[in-house]
Amino acid sequence: MIGILGGTFDPIHYGHLRLAQEVAEGVALNAVRFIPTGKPWHRAPPHASGCHRLAMARLACAGNPLFWADAREVASQAPGYTVDTLSALRQELGQDLPLCLILGADAFLGLTSWHRWPLLFELAHIVVAQRPGFPSPDDQAGLPPALAAQWRARRVTDTAALRNTAAGHIYLQTITALNISATRIRADLAAGRSARYLLPDIVLDYIHRNRLYERSPQQ
Ligand SMILES: Nc1ncnc2c1ncn2[C@@H]1O[C@H](COP(=O)(O)OP(=O)(O)OP(=O)(O)O)[C@@H](O)[C@H]1O
Ligand SMILES: O=C(O)c1ccc[n+]([C@@H]2O[C@H](COP(=O)([O-])O)[C@@H](O)[C@H]2O)c1
């Protein structure tokens, strides 16, 4: 079973890495692919280029045999819709392998705005985790009605259900709450404050060597 963690990763940080690690252990994944977005259609352009964000993801993944940074969205000129990425992975990996799309609560709460979002359930399971500062995904009052309906229909509490079908379930993984965001890291760096212990040293060294995030970020 493979996990997919997409993100802007501008830059990648311990919130992403613990999310991937704890989901991998929680649902018994064989690998997690980190897929940095190329030119995201849904938010302001990233501060660092796709090449830099991919390089930082590669550095962060090195040393963990489960983790792998996937260049496909950065290398593509297409809008980077997750449904297209999952379709391509399905073609490569076959129809039977269970795929788990990993989402933090903020991403999950916005799911109904995603391109062709109901199709995502035909391509992968969704494993969602809480994130500090956002409503818990199992608080149905906080979900848009269409997503709450999917939650009721698809939610499973036994990880065996994820292994037994290739796609279509929703699973809530409890993880260590880390109130870390890339926005905060960019703000710290732009203000000349240290971002140590929020992200791996090897990524921070890369940021300093390449003089990323030195100017005041536009939020
Ligand atoms: N601290 C965290 N805890 C749980 N999930 C997280 C955390 N940080 C990011 N994620 C999840 O990782 C994925 C990618 O997030 P993203 O790259 O946008 O990071 P971010 O820190 O939210 O960035 P930014 O502050 O620039 O919006 C999303 O599914 C998001 O919910
Ligand atoms: O496919 C979509 O329409 C879509 C809309 C919003 C976000 N996503 C994906 O969700 C992931 C997390 O996005 P973000 O903004 O939190 O970095 C990333 O892989 C995005 O490509 C995808």
Image (cartoon, rainbow, N blue to C red):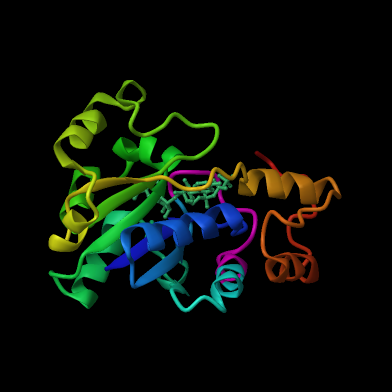
The quarter of the image holding the C terminus is top right
All told, the count of numbered labels is: 0
- Residue 124 in which image quadrant: bottom left
- Residue extending farthest to the top is 141
Is most of the magenta stretch helix, strand or loop?
A: loop
| Image position of 83 with respect to 170: above or below | below
- Residue 66 in which image quadrant: bottom left
Residue drawn at (33%, 40%) of the image = 111
Is residue 130 in view?
A: yes
Looking at the image, residue 118 sits to the left or right of residue 106; the answer is left
Q: Does the magenta stretch include residue 120?
A: no
The foreground one among 2 and 207 is 2
The quarter of the image holding the N terminus is bottom left
Looking at the image, residue 217 sits to the left or right of residue 42; the answer is right
- Across and down, in percent, residue 129 comes to 41, 45
Is residue 8 in view?
A: no
- Across and down, in percent, residue 198 comes to 69, 54
| Image position of 46 with respect to 25: above or below | above
- Across and down, in percent, residue 83 comes to 27, 55
- Across and down, in percent, residue 177 comes to 54, 43
The foreground one among 146 and 48 is 146
Looking at the image, residue 55 sits to the left or right of residue 87; the answer is right
- Residue extending farthest to the right is 192
Residue drawn at (49%, 32%) of the image = 134
Q: Is residue 44 magenta?
A: yes
Magenta residue span: 41-54
Residue drawn at (32%, 59%) of the image = 27
| Image position of 174 with respect to 94: above or below | above
| Image position of 66 with respect to 120: above or below | below
Residue drawn at (16%, 74%) of the image = 94
